[in-house]
Amino acid sequence: MNKITLDKTDRKILSVLQADGRLSNQDVAEQVSLSPSPCLRRVKRLEEAGVIRQYVALLDPEKIGLGLLAYVNVRLEKHSDATAHAHSTARVLAPNLAPSLVTTTSPRADFAVAVAQWPEVVACYAMTGEMDYLLRVHVEDMEHFSRFMMATLLRHPAVLDVKSSFALQRIKDTTALPLL
């Protein structure tokens, strides 16, 4: 992970853009007390360094019919030593086989690929502790959540256990990171 050094002006620019990513360069420059050219150079540098990943519109989930927010803890079956040994042996004995015929994936890798395809899951984190993953799931209602669980999540072969919690009230929900 390459960490970039941010000075006070960079932090001001990032703070302004986190509050409103649609501001023109002129407006950002005025708010951080720079002329437009140096401001634009700094923004471009922050974009190229990956500090600014993208500009997006933040939608209100309830206003687009996604009124139920669930946090789902997922525990996967562990990839056994015997299975790992079998894959390793297959690669040694048949090195010319197509990679798709000698699978080297783990339950974790398979699960990560699957999660990326599920539109209900808006965030997925690998976790420490009792569970392996934490999913943030936005759905219309409990019926939609039930369908997602039964037809999608619980059908994944690596899933061993799930525990769900539902948000009752949004107290704080921000995408702005602290710029210390």
Image (spheres, helix red, strand yellow):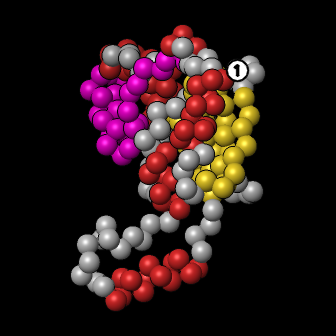
Circle 1: element type? loop
Residue 114 x, y percent position in the rendering:
46, 48
> 43 or 172: nearer the eye?
172
Q: Quadrant of residue 43?
A: top left
Q: Nearer the viewer, residue 43 or 60?
A: 60
Would residue 90 be seen by someone viewing this image from the given angle?
A: yes
Residue 171 visible in rendering? no
What is the quadrant of residue 54 in the picture? top left
Q: Is residue 91 left or right of residue 31?
A: left
Q: Which residue is mark 1?
A: 170
Magenta region: 33-61
The residue positioned 30% from the left and 85% from the top of the image is: 94
Check residue 52 for magenta coloring: yes
| Image point (48%, 20%), residue name | 58
| Image location (x, y in percent) of residue 65 | 54, 14
At a point 28% along the width and 84% down the height, the residue shown is 95
Residue found at x 40% / y 36%: 52
Q: In this orientation, which residue lies closer to the viewer: 99 or 6?
A: 99
Report whether 76 appears left or right of 117: right
Q: Where residue 141 appears, x then y in whole percent?
A: 62, 20
